[in-house]
Amino acid sequence: MGTTFFRTAETLITGTGSIAQIGEQAKKLNATKVIIVTDKIIRQTGLLSKVTEPLKAVGLGADIIDDVVPEPPFENLEQMVTQMEGKGYDLLVGVGGGSALDITKVLSVMLTNKGNVRDMVGIEKIGNPGVPTILVPTTSGTGSEVTYNAIFTDTRDMVKKGIVSPYLLPKVAIVDAELTLTVPPAVTAATGMDALVHAVESYTAIRADELTDGIALQAIKLISRSLRKAVYNGKDVKAREDMAMGSLLAGISLGNAGVGAVHALAYPLGGKFKVPHGVANSLLLSFVMKYNAVADLEKFAEVAGAMGENVEGLSLREAADRAVHALAKLSKDVGIPASLKDVGVTPADIPGLAEEASKVDRLLNNNPRWLTVKEIQKIYEEAYGSVETPSFVTI
């Protein structure tokens, strides 16, 4: 085992009702001027009172900026930082799904680093720490509250791009399942499957290690047993707690072991076809895993077991195959689109998608199986339904 680095939020606070701790945490960070970063839907739900009331209780008011948009482009960031510059904010509180949390993280460093946000794209291209942040997820999916990356849409070439830096990690992450009880079924499904993708990809990633393996497997277990319940009975508190913890654990594993080809192939779908990140990942998951499984039969057999599949008496190859089918079944059961044609892709689009995905070296280099442009195109074709789907071990 070589040298590894393990990074996550400085302080993690979890549990139903834990949002009540935010005022105390803000005071520990010596905050005097706070701004909450969120979107208009979260503001309309009334959830922000769960944040503002504990802040008021310790004598802190908070400005609110609610301009976050889904799958945010760089322009969204630039507009918001213009509104915030020079106002002396010493604490940013991100409240919402992955888009709000990613924007909060990057706004934090844009306030302390000069230059264009596009100059930050890539790995560790941020020179100075940002304004301290507290991140509060309201969905169980992205794990953004514990990762040091943020994903945005570049409208110049319509491709998703990542900013990766330890300076994006928050001072505090508060994960409270109570904030997810009103999330609609479709969003619960997409974000929950996104968390499962994070867990499975990070567990099978080249950079996975003994620390991340246990975390990822527990995430797979929690999500697999509770996602259906959370989607179809959103008031099931135990299911929501499982999903909140599963998403958090998957985010920690993702943040340290990284992800692979599912995300690489999902990026062009999000950029060019506006497919929500969680949907794109979920749609592609079983198709990519079908190709990956043969590269690490042992780990995929363990994924099947964590998902609750009975693998007793099966060969490693049969057990790994069971994992791929279980992933596809779960995705179908919670209503994720089953084909690329369902999200507007045509056969003529597939070669271009494959070329774009093949450029995402940061992720493809962490995938357990090397994929050429030809293989990436075939995966897209299978996900479209334009070729007969083979057994996962045939290619």
Image (spheres, rainbow, N blue to C red):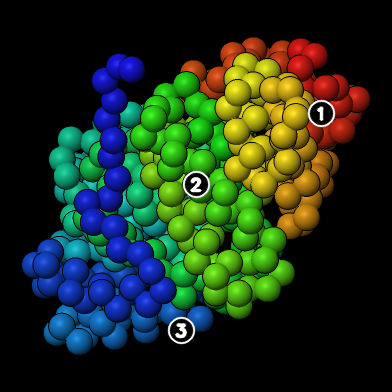
The residue that appears at 76% across and 13% down in the rendered structure is 395
* Residue found farthest to the front: 313
Q: Which residue is mark 2?
A: 218
The reply to whether dot 1 and dot 3 touch (C-beta < 8 Å) is: no
Residue 205 position within the rendered picture, expressed as x and y whole percent measured from the top left: 50, 26
Residue 274 visible to the viewer:
no
The residue that appears at 37% across and 54% down in the rendered structure is 145
| Mark number, residue 288 | none
Q: Residues within 10 Å of mark 2 (few under 14, many from 20)?
A: some
Q: CA distance from mark 3 to mark 2?
A: 32 Å
Q: CA distance from mark 1 to mark 3?
A: 43 Å
The residue that appears at 56% across and 37% down in the rendered structure is 200
Q: Could you say whether the residue bearing mark 2 is in a helix, strand or loop?
A: helix
Residue 133 position within the rendered picture, expressed as x and y whole percent measured from the top left: 24, 58
Q: Amino acid at mark 1?
A: Glu
Q: Which of 139/3 is in front?
A: 3
Q: Residues within 10 Å of mark 1 (few under 14, many from 20)?
A: some
Q: Which of 51/234 is in front?
A: 234
Q: Could you say whether the residue bearing mark 3 is in a helix, strand or loop?
A: loop
Q: Is residue 392 left or right of residue 147?
A: right
Q: Which residue is mark 3?
A: 46
The reply to whether dot 3 and dot 2 touch (C-beta < 8 Å) is: no
Q: Amino acid at mark 2?
A: Gln
Snapshot quadrant of residue 26: bottom left
Snapshot quadrant of residue 190: bottom right
Residue 326 visible to the viewer:
yes
Q: Is 83 situated above or below 273?
A: below
Mark 3 or mark 1, which is nearer the start of the sequence? 3
Q: Is 104 situated above or below 21?
A: above
Residue 356 position within the rendered picture, expressed as x and y whole percent measured from the top left: 60, 25
| Mark number, residue 382 | 1
Q: Is residue 17 left or right of residue 186?
A: left
